[in-house]
Amino acid sequence: MDRLFTLAGALSALIAVAAGAFGAHGLKGRISSEMLQVFETAARYQMYHALGLLACAWLATRWPGPLAHVAGWAFIVGTLLFSASLYLLALGGPRWLGAITPLGGLAFITGWACIVWLAWGAKA
């Protein structure tokens, strides 16, 4: 699982950098400043959680058990729901996508809570 989270984290970081560059250079002037800000938020949160996935890969080897895996999967689901919905919304997708975004945020919170729980209960 640590290899999967390393791969997913690195791929997600790559996509976040590419999306950020696309937003800054390809979308400026093509979409409203409000929607550009939404797009940038998606890229920023994707990068944060790509790094979180890399942390999960390390944590899975440091403190084996289900919590690092749950956190990693929560970050993957969160990225798909939160960042993807914001990318699509910014690019003119249907407005109902905004209703999906908070579910991704909840998945992110779940992932971080799992890491807190893991670190809190870990044996040195």
Image (cartoon, grey):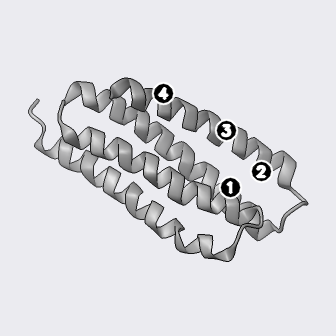
Q: In this view, does 106 lie above or below 124?
A: below
Quadrant of image for the C terminus: top left
| Mark toward the viewer: 3 or 4 | 4
Upstream in sequence: badge 2 or badge 3: 3
Q: Are marks 1 and 2 in contact (CB under 8 Å)?
A: yes
Instruction: State the residue lying farthest toward the left.
Output: 123
Q: Is residue 111 above or below residue 66?
A: below
* Amino acid on which disc 2 is placed: Gly
Local packing at callout 4 (Cα closer than 10 Å; few below 14, some 14-19, many 20+) is some
- Mark number displayed over residue 40: 1
| Mark toward the viewer: 1 or 4 | 4
Q: In this view, does 57 lie above or below 100?
A: above
Q: In which quarter of the image is residue 59?
A: top left
Upstream in sequence: badge 1 or badge 4: 4
Q: Do the residues labelled 1 and 3 touch (CB within 8 Å)?
A: no
Upstream in sequence: badge 1 or badge 2: 2
Q: Do the residues labelled 3 and 4 touch (CB within 8 Å)?
A: no
| Mark toward the viewer: 2 or 4 | 4
* Amino acid on which disc 3 is placed: Val
- Mark number displayed over residue 67: none
Q: Is residue 7 above or below residue 111?
A: above
The percent coordinates of residue 107 (x first, y second) are 39, 58
Local packing at callout 1 (Cα closer than 10 Å; few below 14, some 14-19, many 20+) is many
Out of 85 and 14, give the one closest to the viewer: 85
Residue under pointer 2: 23
* Amino acid on which disc 1 is placed: Glu
Residue under pointer 3: 17
Out of 86 and 37, give the one closest to the viewer: 86
